[in-house]
Amino acid sequence: MRGHDGVHRYYDPSTGQFLNVDPLVDETDTPYAYSAGNPINEIDPSGLADRTPLHNQAVSLTVAALPGSYPAELRGHISSICAMNACNAIPGASKKRNGNTGYADIVVLDYQAEPPTAYIWEVKKYGSISDSAAQAEAAWYVLNFKQQNPGWRAELGFAVGNAPNFNGLDTWSDPTLAGVRWYSQLEVTRPRVPDVDPRLVPYLIAGLGLAAIGQRGAPEPGFRSTLSATTTTGC
Amino acid sequence: MLQTSIDVPDAIVLATAETYESFHSISQEVSEWVERMHGSFIHALVEQGGEVDVWVHVRGETERKVSYPRDWEKSIAELAAGQITSISIGAAVPADALRGLKTFRLWTTPVQGAPEITRITFFARPSALIDELLPPPSVWAQAIQEGAVAIRAVDGFLTVGRAAIVGTAYEDQLMRSPLVGVQEAGTLVRGFFWGSILSARHIAALGGIRRVKQDAPVVRVVDLSRPNHELVYLELTSDLFAVAEDDEEQLREFLAPVLPTANSVRHP
């Protein structure tokens, strides 16, 4: 466990990237990548698929808030933070070792604790999954980590300071639910862009824009566009 | 030394009991116990304006959220009928709900990594008891005793400290796998706690029920035995939040025959 390449990488929250190449690049095809590479789809009714851009942003915000939340026994120790793909490199933090896919969202490794200790988190969309199921997922990694790393201790991750209202995303910990980090989207408080006239939607989806309307025939009687060029771009 | 102080960061008050019985065979008793817990803990929070969050796992389906209170009775009936394999209830007074926190949680679930073993557990932060948002420790003690009887538990505990969700503090100290701890819980205890549930093999190893009642260095011993199921509850001190090191040490010595050591071998 000690000295594993995968745990000696540094994450830069400002760019969302690791500063050296993921040693598992051959396996993951995502050099430097922070997200799981699962692209655009944010629709996740179960919350279990949880590798959406919002989820990845929540992981990123949590990683940024982590050092400020270290318990006394961890402060000043040589430690590293691994997130998402990097957790694949840690025996016990990846389900790949057990024939499945998936990995813990965040692992902090404290090399100077006695015994050396890992703290493990799962990041979940609030309301998409029960408390028990969310914590059970983190607990699964804790158990596996303990089994696969003799001499190491593993714990459910400690409460990390809240990172409220960052770019429309709120992330927080419940101190009584170790190992789980919740996130949720905030209500939009900035002035809203006017709603799109539903009659324009087919054109916008097709990427044709307002200029194309004339080519599709005249608008229906009474139609009056409320859109400006900028709102069209925003759609 | 175990940490039982409420000064431990992220400390929770936690009560747990574990059983080797199949969940199906105890579903009726579990549902009755959950109903009683609803009356003692959840309903008290609802009366304070609290919100309740109920999730169930139905055999062969994914976890689903239950509309509360509308479908509460239906869920209890499904639990009694053995259709539900786990239930997760969280309740929050308004001040906690606003911050995305829960005031109290109650779960009945298979143990993570050992699905043949079922656990009932309920927990909260200590301040929720101290501030009287939740019933006092005596009610918690009564609740875990009733739960242990209902599920025909092999072990159980009531404690204050960090987590004990995956492994107990004692198991952590020994670097003992909590999976081994759970699987051996009918023979070796998982640590020493403010409240301890001991079952037949523990009691026998300690010299029998008479000796436990007579010699256990605790303030209270409750015999919970039923036909074919010997069970006893020990309470270390009169105050859950005040446990002296000496008290712990005496209990540790008394439980030595059933406390795992670093060299403990797995029971066949």
Image (cartoon, rainbow, N blue to C red):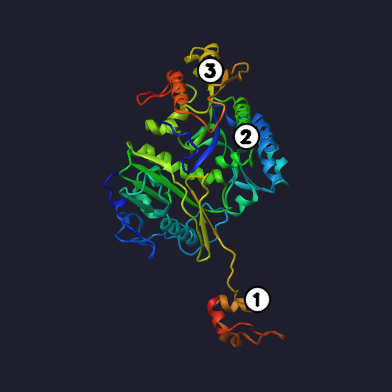
Residue to which mark 1 is pinned: A198
Q: Are marks 3 and 1 in contact (CB under 8 Å)?
A: no
Residue B222, located in which quarter of the rendered image?
top right
Give the Cα distance between marks 2 and 3: 29 Å
* Disc 1 chain ID: A
The label nearer to you, 2 versus 3, is 2
The residue drawn where x is 45% and y is 48% is A121
Q: CA distance from mark 3 to mark 1?
A: 71 Å
**Amino acid type, callout 1:** Pro
Q: Position of residue B197 (x, y in %)?
A: 54, 24
- Badge 3 and badge 1 both on one subunit: no
Q: Is residue A13 above or below residue B265?
A: below
Tell me the CA gap for discs 1 and 2.
58 Å
Q: Which residue is mark 3?
A: B200
Q: Quadrant of residue B16?
A: top right
A95 w.r.t. B182: above or below: below
Q: Locate residue B2 relative to residue B221 in the image: left or right.
A: left
Q: Is residue B161 visible?
A: yes
Residue type at numbered disc 3: Ala
Q: Picture coordinates of residue B12 (x, y %)?
A: 52, 39
Which of marks 3 and 2 precedes in the sequence?
Answer: 2
Where does the image place residue B181, in percent across and percent down from the top left? 44, 29
The residue labelled by disc 2 is: B136
Front in this rendered view, residue A130 or B245: B245
Q: Nearer the viewer, residue A73 or A176?
A: A73
- SS for callout 3: helix
